[in-house]
Image (spheres, rainbow, N blue to C red):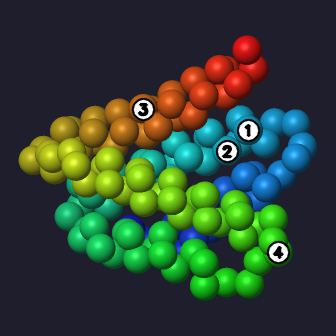
Amino acid sequence: MNKIIMVAVVFSLVTAFSAKEAGADDYLCVAIGGLSKDIMRARQAGVEMAKVMAIADSLGSKDYTEEESLAVKELSTMLKRLTISAYSMPRMLTDDGKERAISDFSNDASLGCFSNLMEDLK
């Protein structure tokens, strides 16, 4: 997994997570889907779980505003939960199986996010 891409996605999530503008929640769910895809791709490629968890731990090593710090803490926790979830699933043997696992994991994460948003609107 490309650490630069992961960091870029996480910073996008920080922006969306701390944004107050309309549509930020939808953007957040789309970004979570993409991040989930990257995490499961790493899982299916055999990247050690500790390396992915280290990325989540490294999020707090930057200087953030107070509002961003709260968002980063929540995002770090979410990243760790997604990683644990991805790594609790088996690695697939075939390329088709790996792609299906990646797609399903991403879709499940997006579904959970959008479902929570819809519940909040009730």
> Pointer 2: residues within 10 angstroms few (<14), some, or many (20+)?
many
Q: Quadrant of residue 100?
A: top left
Seen from the viewer's position, the closer of residues 58 and 34 is: 58
- Of the numbered discs 3 and 1, the one sitting upstream in the chain is 1
Q: Is 24 on the left-hand or right-hand side of 97?
A: right
- Marks 4/2: CA–CA distance: 19 Å
Q: Residue at x 32, y 54 (%)?
A: 84
Amino acid at dot 3: Asp
Q: Earlier in the sequence, mark 4 or mark 2?
A: 2
On screen, residue 58 above or below 6: below
- Which residue shows up at 59% across the image and 59% down it? 75
Where is residue 31 drawn, in percent x and y?
Answer: 61, 48
Write down the residue under mark 3.
Answer: 108
Q: Cα distance, mark 2 to mark 1?
A: 5 Å
Amino acid carrying mark 4 in the image: Thr
Q: Work out which quarter of the rendered image holds the N terminus and state it.
A: bottom left
Q: Residue drawn 48% across and 70% down?
A: 56
- Give yes or no for contact between labels 3 and 1 (Cβ–Cβ under 8 Å): no
Q: Position of residue 64 (x, y in %)?
A: 76, 77
Badge 1 local density, few (<14 within 10 Å), some, or many (20+)?
A: some
- Which marked residue is nearer to the observer: mark 4 or mark 1? 4
The residue labelled by disc 1 is 25
Q: Quadrant of the C terminus?
A: top right
Which element carries disc 1, helix, strand or loop? helix
